[in-house]
Each structure stands twice: as structure tokens, then as C-alpha cells.
DNA sequence: ACTTTTTTTTGATTTACATCAAATACTTAT
DNA sequence: ATAAGTATTTGATGTAAATCAAAAAAAAGT
């Protein structure tokens, strides 16, 4: 069964019908091909995307010119560069699709207008930020602080059991903050 | 010059006078001694604290029973265990004062009531979460991911130039995710 | 001032993971 | 099916930081 935008929105926090109508009207349905960039380094993130199908990666380019993945979004997840979006400042991060993907998007200015217009939308947005940004980032932070490479990989596998079929070893290794050689050895259990 | 609670609140997002009055009425002024625990592991975080003077550390106890600091709050900062506070679930983290400290506190239930009551308070709370939680945590995350021990120490010194006088080497090392021996060698420039 | 406790420094050794280099396996295009 | 390109694995070696152990310095208690 497919999930509608209405479901996604109402599961975050219930909105009265009249507000929901207004909110839905500001979303756009989009389909993008594999490798498409939702956001490019140096730009300001103007959107909130609600992905319904696909895979996206967030990455930086470090001093040595190497791409470092910082996040993956698989299938039904909210995508945005939080810091750039909330501050409306340019980011160093890029967001790129790794499969053909489907999503709904809403613009920053529309979000701001809706926040001012509807008290209940402000309450909805609070839930969104609390559950989708804060909790997720804190989780990742504690993983990097307290877990070693193998434990981080195990935890990722628990969360996305078939991630290995959708994302290459090199890209996963970069997300785990280890080299691909190390991840290959972890998989072969030679470490 | 001392900063009033009113200043702190209005700098986050401007509230109309009538709302401000209501909000201020839910805060309590508190003074606690050094070593006092604002939050103990296993409890649910019921408060948001606005510290005006003092130092607090956040820490976990890891598998080997060692205390691992995850955060410091110095002087004028907002203190809470974000995940526990927003989910109202027990935390593994503790928050302890490292100096005699002064602060204002507001309870979770009061925040929830104010969010429902005042549209403008909801907008205020969004700014609080966006600026104080999200941005800060993302910053720390990227430090741990991209900087080595020495760079993390340098960055901490930039942010709090006299932190070495207020927080012991062992506690700083733990926050930087390195051993105290390593930090000592960094300071002596033997690394 | 002297003892006790805590914190910081120094040295020797170990470890997890990186780096470099090359071989193997897997994809994609022709 | 074969070649060319890309991704993964394997091996040898290097390194940042951990661990272990002990000395030195600083802080707190009598």
C-alpha cells in the first residue's frame, strides 16, 4: 500500500481539515532521476522534501577533495539540510539521489507563511523538528562517540537490513567514517 | 550588566506583552550548589533550564563504568536533555553542575500548556529548538566527524577561551572524546 | 607545614584503523 | 562474448590515539 502525503502529515501531528487543505496546497509532487542533486554545496536549502520512494545521500567534500557522506534517507523520510534551512544560509553540504526517487516538496517561504497563519501548523512543525531532526541527529552523534566501526555498521544494518543492496560499500564506509578497505574487512569478518 | 530572563526570552523571538507576562509567570528562579544534579540517569527530563551563571556538564556512564562527558553549558545557555524532554522518556544521561550556579526553570507541562494557549509562544519555541538544539548538535556532530583531537581542542578553546580554568583536564578530554593523557600531550605540544 | 588525595604529566607499549599498492570480482557497453 | 570501467577484496606497512604504569605537581584536609 502506498502512503499518501496526507497520511505522512497527519501522522506527525493532527491538523484540522481546513488547515490541512491549505497545507496540502503548498506541496508539489516531484519525480527525479538517479544522481539528481536536490541541493548543491554553496546554495541555501529552500525546501523541505518528503520522500516517498528512493534513496538520497548527504555529503561534504573535505580538504583532500574526498566526498564524505553524512547521512542517508531511504524511502519514507524527510529530507532537508536542517542548519541551512532554518538559518537560510548557504551550506557546504550536497544532497544527491542514488536511485530514481519520488517526493513531495514545500518551500521555505510557504512554511514560514503557514507558521504565521495557523497556530496548529506551528504545533505540527514543532513535532516535525523534535522528532525528525533532534532525535535523529542526537542518535547519530552518540553512535560516533561511543561505538567503534563494527558496532556502527551493525547498527546501520539493523536499521536498514537491505542497505547493502541499495548503497555501494564505498558510500556506506564513508557514512560510517571509515575507509572502504576497513568496511570490506568488517564484512569478511577479518577484523 | 546582568541579563534578565525577559531579555533572554525576547532575544529568541519577540513575544507580545500579554504573552510574555504569562510565560514569565511559569519560570522559577533557582540557585544550586556545585556538584548538584539537575538530571540523573534513569529519570525523565521534566525541565528546561535557562542558566545565567555557572557551569554544567552532561555525561553518560559507558560499558566500562567510565563517565563520558557529552556537553558543557557555560554561563548563559539553555540546558535540557533534548531527547528525553521532547519524548518524555527516561534518559541515560546525567546533568551535573560544576560550579555554584543560577538559573531559571520551566516545566514540561507548562511549556505544553503555553504552546497550546499562545500561537506566538509556539513560534518562539520553534526558534528555540532550531537555534539551540539543532544548530548546536549538528555543529558538534561535524566536529567529531571531520576534526582530529587537536583541532577539536582548538575549537573548544576558541569558543571558551578560559575553559581550562573552570573545567579540569580530565573532564575536557572526556568531552573531546580523547584520554586525559592525550589532551595533556596536546597541551604540552608533544603530539 | 605536613599528610592525603586528586589531578596532570611522562614514558613504553598496544591497538584500531588509515594508507598505499595490487589483485580480483563485478558491471556496463560494444 | 569481450573489453573497459568500476567496485571490492587482500596484503603490507604506517600512525593517531588508547592503554598501562608510574612519577610529578597541585589541591584539600588535618
Image (cartoon, coloured by chain):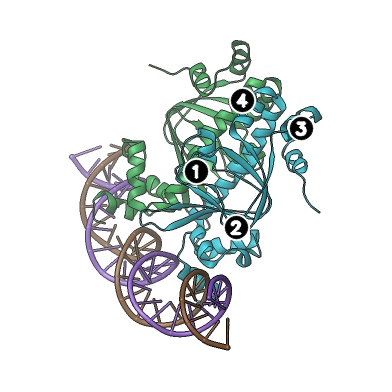
Chain colours: A green, B cyan, C brown, D purple
The residue carrying mark 4 is A123
The residue carrying mark 1 is A138
Label 2 environment density (alpha carbons within 10 Å; few <14, some 14–19, many ≥20): some
- Please indicate, yes or no, whether residue A69 appears anywhere in the rendered image: no
Coordinates of residue B8 in the picture (x, y in percent): 74, 43
Host chain of mark 2: B
Q: CA distance from mark 1 to mark 4?
A: 21 Å
Closer mark to the observer between disc 1 and disc 2:
2
Closer mark to the observer between disc 2 and disc 3:
2
Closer mark to the observer between disc 2 and disc 4:
2
Host chain of mark 4: A
Looking at the image, which is closer to me, C24 or A62? A62
Residue drawn where x is 63% and y is 11% of the image: A18
Closer mark to the observer between disc 3 and disc 1:
3
Label 3 environment density (alpha carbons within 10 Å; few <14, some 14–19, many ≥20): some
Q: CA distance from mark 2 to mark 4?
A: 37 Å
The residue carrying mark 3 is B20
Q: Secondary structure at mark 2?
A: loop
- Please indicate, yes or no, whether residue A101 appears anywhere in the rendered image: yes
Q: Name the mark on residue B34.
A: 2
Q: Are marks 3 and 1 on the same chain?
A: no
Ranked by sequence position, the earlier of labels 2 and 3 is: 3
Q: CA distance from mark 1 to mark 2?
A: 27 Å
Amino acid at each position: 500500500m502506498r502512503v499518501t502525503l496526507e497520511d505522512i502529515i497527519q501522522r506527525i501531528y493532527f491538523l484540522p481539515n481546513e488547515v490541512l487543505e491549505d497545507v496540502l496546497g503548498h506541496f508539489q509532487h516531484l519525480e527525479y532521476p538517479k544522481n539528481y542533486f536536490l541541493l548543491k554545496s554553496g546554495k541555501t536549502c529552500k525546501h523541505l522534501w518528503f520522500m516517498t520512494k528512493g534513496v538520497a545521500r548527504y555529503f561534504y567534500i573535505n580538504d583532500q577533495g574526498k566526498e564524505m557522506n553524512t547521512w542517508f534517507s531511504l524511502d519514507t523520510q524527510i529530507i532537508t539540510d536542517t542548519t541551512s534551512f532554518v538559518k537560510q544560509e548557504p551550506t557546504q553540504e550536497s544532497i544527491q539521489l542514488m536511485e530514481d526517487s519520488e517526493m513531495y516538496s514545500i518551500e521555505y517561504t510557504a512554511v514560514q507563511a503557514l507558521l504565521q497563519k495557523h497556530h496548529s501548523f506551528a504545533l505540527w512543525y514543532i513535532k516535525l523538528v523534535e522528532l525528525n531532526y533532534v532525535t535523529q541527529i542526537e542518535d547519530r552523534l552518540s553512535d560516533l562517540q561511543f561505538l567503534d566501526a563494527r558496532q556502527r555498521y551493525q547498527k546501520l544494518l539493523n536499521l536498514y537490513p537491505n542497505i547493502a543492496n541499495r548503497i555501494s560499500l564505498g558510500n556506506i564506509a564513508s557514512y560510517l567514517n571509515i575507509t572502504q578497505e576497513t568496511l570490506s574487512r568488517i564484512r569478511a569478518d577479518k577484523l
